[in-house]
Image (cartoon, rainbow, N blue to C red):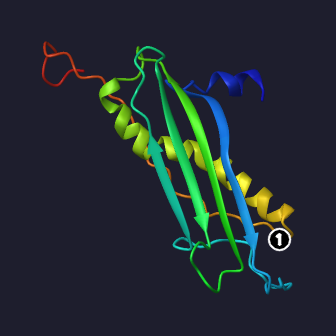
Amino acid sequence: MSEKQTESYKLHAIQLIGLKVQELFIVISSNYEEDETSHQSIDEGTFTWNIGYSEYDQIKHQIALKVSIIIGDNEKDSPFSLKVSLLGIFEVDESRFPLMHIEHWAKNNAPLVLYPYLREHVYSLTSRAGLKGVILPLFEVPTFRISKELDKKTTPGKI
C-alpha cells in the first residue's frame, strides 16, 4: 500500500489484539460422494452463527468475543457436520470510543470483524477434509458512527 493510501485510512478506536481458535471440528458422512457439480457456497439458513461476549474489563481496556459457526449439525441428509469457534480479544481506546456503546458494538460490529477469520477456517477445514472448500456468504456491514453532542451554546443554524 502506498503512503497516500495509508494516510487516507484512520485506525478504529477498537482494535483486535488477540485471536485464538477454540474449536475446529468436521465429520464427513460415510456415504457422501462429491460430484463435479457440487456447489461450494453455503446459503443463509443452512448454518448457525453464534456470538457471545464478556463484560468490558475497565482495567485492561479489553472485551472478549466468541464467535462460532455450525453447519450440518442434527441434519440427517447433510454431507458433513462442521463447527468452528474463535475467541477474539479487543482493546478499546476509551478516549475515542464512548463506553456506553461498547455492548452495542460487541453485539453488532465485533462479530463481523471476526467473520472473515471464520470464513477462512471453514474454507480451509473443508478443503483439507477433501471437499471442494465451503465458502460462507458475505453479510451487509452495518455502520456505527459516533457523533459528538453539539455544544449547547451553539447558535441555532450554526455548527
Residue 148 in picture, x, y percent from top left: 30, 23
Residue 151 left/right relative to 51:
left
Relative placement, left or right, of 51 versus 72 is left
Q: Residue 83, position in %: x, y?
A: 64, 60
The answer to which quarter of the image holds residue 153 is top left
Question: Which quadrant does the N terminus fall into?
Answer: top right
- Dot 1: what SS? loop
Identified at 54% across, 70% down, the residue is 44
Viewer-closest of 127 and 30: 30
Q: Nearer the viewer, residue 152 or 86?
A: 86
**Rendered location of residue 133, percent (x, y):** 79, 66
Q: Residue at x 43, y 39 (%)?
A: 106
Which quarter shows the C terminus?
Answer: top left
Closest to the observer, 67 or 102: 67
Q: Residue at x 24, y 23 (%)?
A: 149
The vertical placement of 65 against 56, above or below, is: below
Kind of residue at badge 1: Lys
Q: Residue at x 79, y 84 (%)?
A: 32
- Please tell me whether residue 14 is drawn above or below residue 114 in the rendered image: above
Q: Which residue is labeled 1 in the image? A: 132
